[in-house]
Amino acid sequence: MAKQPICAVTHVRHEHDFLEKWIAHYAPIVGGRENLFVVIDGDDWEPKVDLSGIDTEVILDAPRRRIKNDRFMAKLMSGRANDLRKTYDNVIRGDVDEYVVIDPEADLDWDDALKEQVEAGYIFALGCDVVQGPKEKKPVDRTKPILGQRKCGYIADRYTKPFVISRWNNWAGGAHRLINRPVEISNHFVLFHMALADQNIAQERMDARGGTDQHRSFVGHQTDRLNAIADDGLAKPLDWEEARRIGMEEFPVEPEDGSPAPRPRPSRDPRNLEQGLPVRIPDRFFGLT
C-alpha cells in the first residue's frame, strides 16, 4: 500500500492556546486533522480544545525533572515518529509552541519544499524565537495570527531544530538535534517559537504547570525564559537577511575548526545575545501563524 504524504505529531502538557494554534496551523499542511497525532502528558488535566478527528494518546509516566523529562520525551516521540514513517513519507515532529512556515520569498509549496531534505532524510528549520518587544504593550488577540501582532524576535541556534524526517532518525534532548546527524539547515523553512510572544500567556503557562511548586529545574528554566521578554537587545535589531546569513553560516559548524556540528552552535558575531541575533520579523511573514 502506498504511503500517505505527510503527518504531524506533538506532545502537550497543560496547553490550550498553543495546542489550538498547532492544530489550526498544521491541519491544512498535512491534509486534514486525521493526519495529526497528539501525545497528552498526564491524566491530571484535560485539553480545552476540540480534538475530534485527531489521533490522541495519554501517557502517565513522564518524569517531572527537566533533563529527565527532555530525554524521556525525546525517546518516546522519536519512537512515535519512526512508527508513523511506516504510513507516511514525511513526519513533522515539533513542540506545540513551534510553527514551521515556508519563507514566502521561496515561492514553494510544501511538496516541493520537502524535497530539500538530505540523503539521511531530515532537515533543520532556521529558528526565530518570537518575543514580546518592549514597545508591544498590548496583549495578543488569541483568535488571530501572532506574527504581525508581534514583530520582534531572535534568530536563534537553540530554536534551529530538525522538524521533519523521511527516513529513520532519532531526536535527542529537547529535540534540538538528531542522534549521529550533522546540522543541515533549510534554505526556506523557518521555525517560529512562540512561547514568549505574549507575557500573559507565558505566565499562564507556567502557572498551569504548577508555578513555583514544580521541580526547581523547571522553575529556573521557565523563570529565565520569562525574563528574556524584558531584554533590551531588541531595541537595536539586525537586518533579517543579515542575521539569517550569519545563522546559516555559523550555526551548522564548530567554532574551533569549522567542522560539522552535531547541534546548532551559537553565532560568534559580537552582536549575538544569549537569546540569539535580535531582529525585526519581515512583513512577508505576518499572518502566517
Image (cartoon, helix red, strand yellow):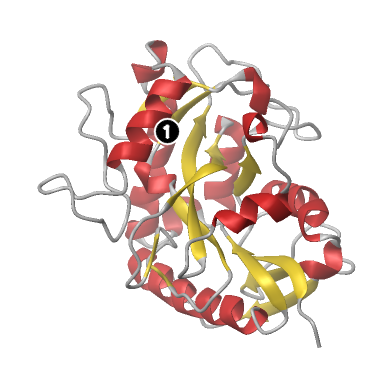
Residue 251 in the image: x percent, y percent?
31, 44
User: For residue 148, what is the image quadrant?
Assistant: top right
Can residue 190 be spotted in the picture?
no
User: Considering only vertical position in the picture, is 137 above or below 112?
Assistant: above
Pick the front one: 51 or 120: 120
Residue 15 in the image: x percent, y percent?
66, 55
Image point (68%, 67%), residue name: 45
Is 163 displayed left or right of 21 in the figure? Answer: left
| Mark 1 element type | strand
Is 10 displayed left or right of 76 in the figure? Answer: right
Give the labeled residue for mark 1.
155
User: Considering only vertical position in the picture, is 225 above or below 105?
Assistant: below
Question: As shown in the figure, which amino acid type bears the numbered disc 1?
Answer: Ile
User: Considering only vertical position in the picture, is 40 above or below 232?
Assistant: below
Is 257 displayed left or right of 140 in the figure? Answer: left
- The image quadrant where one finds the N terminus is bottom right
Image point (19%, 50%), residue name: 254
Image point (72%, 81%), residue name: 87
Residue 66 in the image: x percent, y percent?
38, 64
